[in-house]
Image (tube, rainbow, N blue to C red):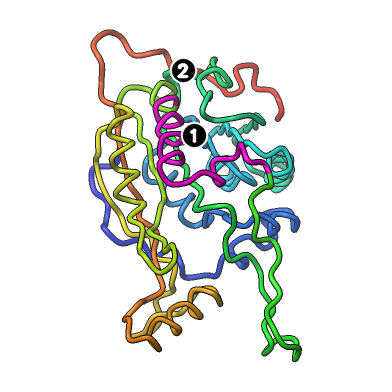
Amino acid sequence: MAEVTTSVWATGQRPSRVQRRGRYVPESMRHPGKMLPSIAARVIDTYTQPGELVVDPMCGIGTTLVEATHLGRHAAGVEYEEQWARLAVANLGYAKKQGASGFGRVVAGDARNIARLLPDLAGRAALVLTSPPYGTYTHGHIRSTRDTGEPGVRKWNHHYSADRGNLAHQQLPALLEGFGRILAGCRDLLRPGGVAAITVRPYRVRGELVDLPGHVHQVASEAGLAFADRIVCLLCGLGEGHLLNRASFFQLHEARKAWARGLPVHAVAHEDLLVFVRPHVLGPEPAAPTSYPPDGGEL
């Protein structure tokens, strides 16, 4: 792991759609909860070396995997929803056509059983990078009256899934229990001293702030991971003496309604990056693979 990191990363200088344009297949925009490519790339560049293995147990459309392969790392991902798993494979193929030198693979399955889904990777990963879901839906894409001239707001691409087995459908206690199982499985995939990095932010339920970063810190510790660092990844941009707003329509709408009621609520403009390490164990470390996949094959 790198010896020195800064506590705030300027990862929001370009909007998400600009970061993805020409780098991901257009259908990728359908996913409602994508990790910022700039965050994924910064984490991978900071905590791994070329040729090492990166794992994302909830990989969605494959942002972690794509950025890893572009940086010459190898990547493996698990995704519960088959539609997103297919998009992750498409994005890996697109990265390969653009000259990405790393290999990647995607498994469609439940990451609560990740050790069984990726048994050949036990003790081999240098980095696990992922993010938990924030509920059954997100802000997605919208068109307001200002955009269309018609009354009301139209939303689309804001649901993860209709499958009740998806962790996104679970209430907070069940979500944390399931995410803890995922992290425990990921711990077994990490090599001793390997890093688990989790991007997470607080969110509001009926106006009440839920400290999801604090909860994730607890379940990661219970999964046997040792806390190492906390970094702020900005979602806003840094201009000349001012911040560049990247908040969604609904973030701003809810904040304005709260202010009208006398509540000084602000839109969240950062992701917490919680960094953990798999503690070293007695005995020899597993030998690192010379290539990934082991036969150097395609996706």
x, y percentage for residue 100?
63, 42
Counting other residues with Cα less than 10 Å from the Cα at mark 1, is it few (<14), some (14-19), or many (20 or more)?
many
Q: Residue at x 69, y 23 (%)?
A: 297
Q: Residues within 10 Å of mark 2 (few under 14, many from 20)?
A: some
Say which residue label 1 marks: 54
- 5 with respect to 105 (left or right): left
Q: Which residues are magenta?
A: 163-185
| Label 2 to label 1: alpha-carbon separation | 12 Å
Is the N terminus in the top left, top right, bottom left or bottom right quadrant? top left
Going by the numbered disc 2, the residue's amino acid type is Ala
In the image, is residue 203 part of the stretch drawn in magenta?
no
Assign the magenta stretch its main secondary structure.
Answer: helix
Residue 159: percent from left, percent from top: 65, 55
In the rendered image, which quarter contains the C terminus?
top right
Q: Which is nearer the eye, 66 or 210?
A: 210
Q: Residue 122, which numbered label?
A: 2
Please report the residue visible at 69 percent of the width from the left and 70 percent of the height from the top: 155
Badge count:
2
Question: Measured along the vertical axis of the image, is residue 240 above or below residue 12?
Answer: below
Q: Which residue occupies the foreground of this view, 142 or 9?
A: 142
